[in-house]
Image (tube, rainbow, N blue to C red):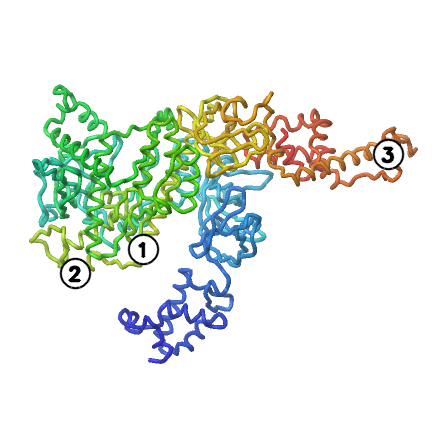
Amino acid sequence: MNKKKSADPHAAREAARYENPIPSREFILGHLEKSIGPLTHQELCREFRLADDDAIEALRRRLRAMERDGQTVRNRRGAYGTLDKMNLVKGRVSGHPEGFGFVLSKGADGDIFLSSRQMRRVMDGDEVLVRIAGHDRRGRPEGSIVEVVEHRTEQLVGRYFSESGIYFVRPDNPRISQDVLIIPEEATAAKPGQIVLVAITRQPSRNSQPAGRVIQVLGDHLAPGMEIELALHNFSLPHVWPKALGKQLAGIANEIPDSDKKNRIDLRHLPLVTIDGEDAKDFDDAVYCERMGRNGWRLFVAIADVSHYVAPGSELDIEAYERGNSIYFPGQVVPMLPEKLSNGLCSLKPEVDRLCMVCEMRIDTSGVVKQFQFYEAVMHSRARLTYTQVAVMIAERRESDSPVRQQFKNIVAHIDNLHDLYGALKENRALRGAIDFDTVETRILFDTERKIEQIIPTERTDAHRLIEECMLSANVCAATLLEKSKLPVLYRVHEGPREEKLEDLRSFLGELGLGLPGGDKPSAHDYQEVLNQAAGRPDADIIQSVMLRSMTQAVYQADNAGHFGLNYEGYTHFTSPIRRYPDLLVHRAIRALLRSKKRVAHLNRNTGAQLQALEKNYPYNVVQINEGGDHCSMTERRADEATRSVVNWLKCEYLLEHVGSEFRGVVSSVTGFGLFVELEPIYIDGLVHITGLPKDYYHHEAAHHRLVGERTGRTFRLGDVLQVRVARVDMEERKIDLELVDDGTGGSSKRKRKKQQPVASARAQELTSEHKERQSTGKKSSRKKSANTSESSKAKKTDGKKTRSKKARGKKSGAKSKRPTKGARATDVHQSPRKAQNKSRSKLTAYFGGVPKSLHRYERNRILAAALSSHPKLKQLDTGGVLWLNYLF
């Protein structure tokens, strides 16, 4: 072996993996870092002294893989270099509705800003290489796109328009701000205003818009169910089953054969039951609890054995991984597994045999799990109970004539045991110091046409809590088992709050007379202590809301870093393999351990089962598990965003019929651009823009969650009660605009005022002192030019006689009369709106007063521009003038 190869610190690892080992990724990166410039594949082969054709080809594939993974960059001459050495950042584009965007990259210190000009070349989701070109006024790094590595948008959905012979689709995804041009012949049977699916035939570039062809007409804009169609495409949600799955599903019997029940522990004698919501269809967990005298309880948590049906690497597995989880839209589910499994063979339906994975626990009277074991079993559910039924059983425990308890008299004692066990687990939870946020969840009720009939809060009862505690116990046991096994698995990790969030939280709590103990690293117990102190206060909900926002988001990863919120040292997801892929991976790990010769505690192996090599049932390494964790974390966020989008659409559609209606509302969030207000009693949020607040300059104090008026001291803060009116609903952007009904209600003021000032205009609110000075200068200039224009007009009427008005004659001799140019006239109108408004409002109203505010800004501007072009005196207005008129009328 040559010197270059022998210098590779990972040579032994490569030799163990491959017959013809090549330099490791780490060694290649180190070599590129030390080189004086980028190196081609051939140059690297020479430097590594690779002569064998197989080794040369293997290095080429490795370099391409490193490029794909973002470890290296290849320039135009095919030479490879590291990102740092080439001063480049690779990342994914995240668009903004206003036209600009950001590059999101793991390697960068923060998001990189892309101007609207840079965004012309890309769409949301594209992968790019950018060079840091500077920093904006906020100090954020600003990027310049060097190369578009990959265009990720191949299809999109949007609304089809035809205007002056030009056909285009406006994407429904607000993060894509470019319209897609459509060739008329490729518009199929689409009608203007309809929602269509478009295949991109030309990606955007510096000099051209994207183009595409309509491949499917999805329906009318407000057709029932359209919100889900849009979400499926906007968030690239896999929802069509591949044809290849048909053959695999056909090979799975509709009933469980007796051969599959062998070598499993038989639990069919136990009265296991499922407890779920009224509209649930996939039942993946069942429970049974029995009392053990004074020693506590024995709890059985049986989970559907999905791993028996979905083998690693199968078509089913590949599709389940892509989906990552089931998505629960209002009234519709996009399942992770085909219905034959999710609602059939895997679902723990009553009165049928089902295969399951069981966690059996012995729990003492203080709620501590003293022993546990996992095993494969076969079960027979006795009942499909709902949370409502169980809640009634608990509430009517001492009533002998309770109809619900009579209906389920054969299992009611088991429910009582479960509730007693819950009391102990709840007590242990409090001692452990887990955070218990009591948030309000809502449920949407539809009419026969899938329109919102009502939005109601869902009550969280002891029935919900006892199932939650049982599942938590099983998940912790699974994490303990897998931690001891040393297998690479996915843990559910929740890190503690960030330092900056803690600082803001402490500042907020301090104003309310509360303090968060724990120093730089408060525990979950410290958080719960604050919640306990706040209980019973009128602002308890607000305190809870702010504390919740200070938390980080839980993720899936191979490194077991604990769960901050639940205050567990180790936690994983085991109890929902029908709807979550991480749970399926955990099941595979436990199944592999049960069927292997590896000696691990907490396993109950059936002696009749044939033992196999661990790798056969669990072929994963740490790298693959971490990649799976990143992917599943992404699909979880994607599902949340898609569900939120659907709910926002439905809420906007509901409020379309309530524009002009007044509601009492509570400020649910405070931002730099206004107040989000939750309307009572319909649980819908809308925005009171900062320009709609009483006239003042408002400063956003983020740490204190409030807006404070500079002049008046008027303060609007989280939790304030306001009377508002629904002013506008924008279906395309899923936005609801609200306005204050009475400027004198809501908020608080430090100063007394005789009379409330009118609402500040958008322009006045946004002007800085520098802009105001420029505005003043523009007005003076406009008055001079207006006088000169008038003088010029009179001169024409007197056949060339140089007569002057008194005002003109009164000017100093140094002031020359000069007719303004078209450009100047356009600028004058834009810079002096008050004068133009006073002189021409009656004339302009005829042209612009009828343009409804509810129209999208694009449509309004188009109508205004058309009217301007047909009016001889107004067609000289520039874009600024159009936008100003848009605001004025």
Quarter occupied by residue 341: top left
Q: Which residue is mark 1?
A: 626
User: In the image, is residue 66 above or below residue 493?
Assistant: below
- Under circle 2, the secondary element is loop
User: Alpha-carbon distance for marks 1 and 2?
Assistant: 23 Å
Residue visible at 28% across and 47% down in the picture: 581
Which part of the image, by quadrant, shows the C terminus?
A: top right
Residue 811 is tagged as 3
Q: Residues within 10 Å of mark 2 (few under 14, many from 20)?
A: few
User: In the image, is residue 44 above or below residue 761?
Assistant: below
- Mark toward the start of the polypeptide (3 vs 2): 2
Residue 613 is tagged as 2
Kind of residue sitting beneath label 1: Asn
- Mark toward the start of the polypeptide (1 vs 3): 1
Residue 593 rendering spot, x and y as whole percentages? 17, 55
Quarter occupied by residue 678: top left
User: Alpha-carbon distance for marks 3 and 2?
Assistant: 101 Å
Which part of the image, by quadrant, shows the N terminus?
A: bottom left
